[in-house]
Image (spheres, helix red, strand yellow):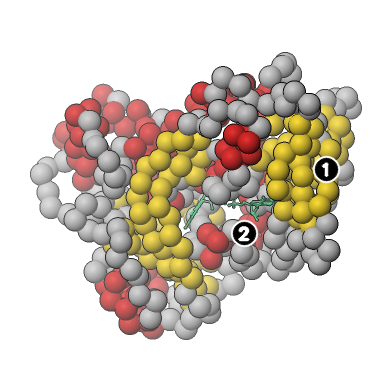
Amino acid sequence: MSSVRPYRHAVVIGASIGGLCAARVLSDVAERVTLVDRDELPVEPIARRGVPQSRHLHLLLARGRSALEELFPGLSDELIAAGVSAIDLQSDFRWHLDGYLVRPEPSGLIGLAVSRPLLELAIRSRVEALLGVTIADRCEVTGLATSPDRARLTGVRTRNRADDKAESTIDADLVVDAAGRGTRTPVWLEGLGYTRVPEERLGIQVAFISRTYRREPHYLDGHIGETFSPYPGRQLGGVAMAQEGDRFIVTLAIRGEEKLQIGRAAMADYADSFSPGIAEVIRTGKPLSEPAQMRFPASIRRRFEQLDRFPEGYLVIADALCSFNPRYAQGMTVAALEALLLSRLIREGGHELHLRFFAAAAALLDTPWDLMVSGPNVEGERTEEMLAMDQYLERYRAAAAKDAVLGTELIRVINMLDEPSRLFAPDLAERVNRTARPCSR
Ligand SMILES: Cc1cc2nc3c(=O)[nH]c(=O)nc-3n(C[C@H](O)[C@H](O)[C@H](O)COP(=O)(O)OP(=O)(O)OC[C@H]3O[C@@H](n4cnc5c(N)ncnc54)[C@H](O)[C@@H]3O)c2cc1C
């Protein structure tokens, strides 16, 4: 990196995975970087209020692991030394997708069975140590500061969440919003006279309930983890996985308006309907945490690339840009890939970074988004084309339960290593036709 840095001061809103990855790449191109978070950031690997999903199971996919490794060299080894398992995503982790178990076989696709709080803490420690980076916690961004014609951002307005509640403005020549799915950017921009950003929503109405247990070696027949997705006709799903510190985390998911009960017996009964293995963990495990609940009504994609006007010096990244149904565990991977994309675009140079970033990020997001749209659980009208795709993918999953090659290709797509269109390629379609028989789940 040349010593000439195009930015004087970059501010990142939100010091979670998305914001930390963004701060890491901005530290190469800005003289100073300030990360602002409204939470008090813990010095231990514990869940926090501003990231409610941190109480729920998080799996780091192979592509996410390599992207984070690029940003933070040595991170995987550091986590493994802290007790995290590196796992083969086809043989150690079992995917029951819409009732079909992807045939377990070593794939060479290695992810991490890490808890969300430990991953965030490990990354934050790295970012904190970077020259020129400051993390300001208990500091909430309340609005944007702009040039008089409102065409360019000049900083953010903040309120200190510590005792004095002091308000101030932090000047910046680049601001990156990584405030998560509840970002205020659409409202702030509207207040400045910009058009409301078009938003796509895929309603799924899922509720999650999670609890952590002491790990026993026989859980899930010795496997590290397994996931069961809900599908039409079966509203329940769940996922369980070993974590560092000899823990096992269980997250149950239920669709629709039904309410999950948080008692041990009720949770075990829910799990019994799809996984006796997960039910056993709940029924016999020693709990290490209270049950935590969270609702996830919809995947949300904000189409900033479709706006005619957008202020210079402003970007939106990670969940604030697009937040997914966690069915395929892609959120953190996408956040890391977007940070790498941002790094590349800044290095390439040129004007109107926001235009270039939103266009390129939209292309990146098409892959995981298309996978969600093609899922059988999504609410709303299905076009004929979608129905044909659903039918093919159903046959694909049935075939992948028997044919490990089809299974690996599917896991590669979930890992964002290949486009979903790969699953429709003639060689794979031929294997599906050969292998899939009309079969019951
Ligand atoms: C139940 C569930 C399970 C998931 N499982 C997985 C998984 O297995 N694998 C995976 O890769 N992904 C998973 N995800 C997605 C993953 O959690 C996110 O994609 C990832 O954390 C990136 O989020 P983010 O950094 O963009 O936002 P968040 O993690 O939501 O963080 C936003 C941050 O911004 C701060 N903030 C918000 N507003 C302000 C403000 N005004 N001023 C200052 N600070 C502010 C918050 O305090 C917070 O720190 C899951 C999500 C859910 C809901």
| Helix, strand or loop status at disc 2 | loop
Q: Does the numbered disc 2 mark a residue whose Cβ is under 8 Å from ligand 1? A: yes
What's the residue type where badge 2 is placed? Gly
What percent of the width, then of the height, locates residue 273? 24, 69
| Helix, strand or loop status at disc 1 | strand
The residue under label 1 is: 170
Q: Residue at x 64, y 68 (%)?
A: 46
In the picture, the disc for residue 245 is none
What percent of the width, then of the height, locates residue 10? 79, 37
Q: Is residue 275 visible?
A: yes
In the picture, the disc for residue 50 is 2
What's the residue type where badge 1 is placed? Ile
Q: Quadrant of the N terminus?
A: top right
**Dot 2, crowdedness within 10 Å: few (<14), some or many (≥20)?**
some
Q: In which quarter of the view is residue 391 placed?
A: top left
| Mark in front: 1 vs 2 | 1
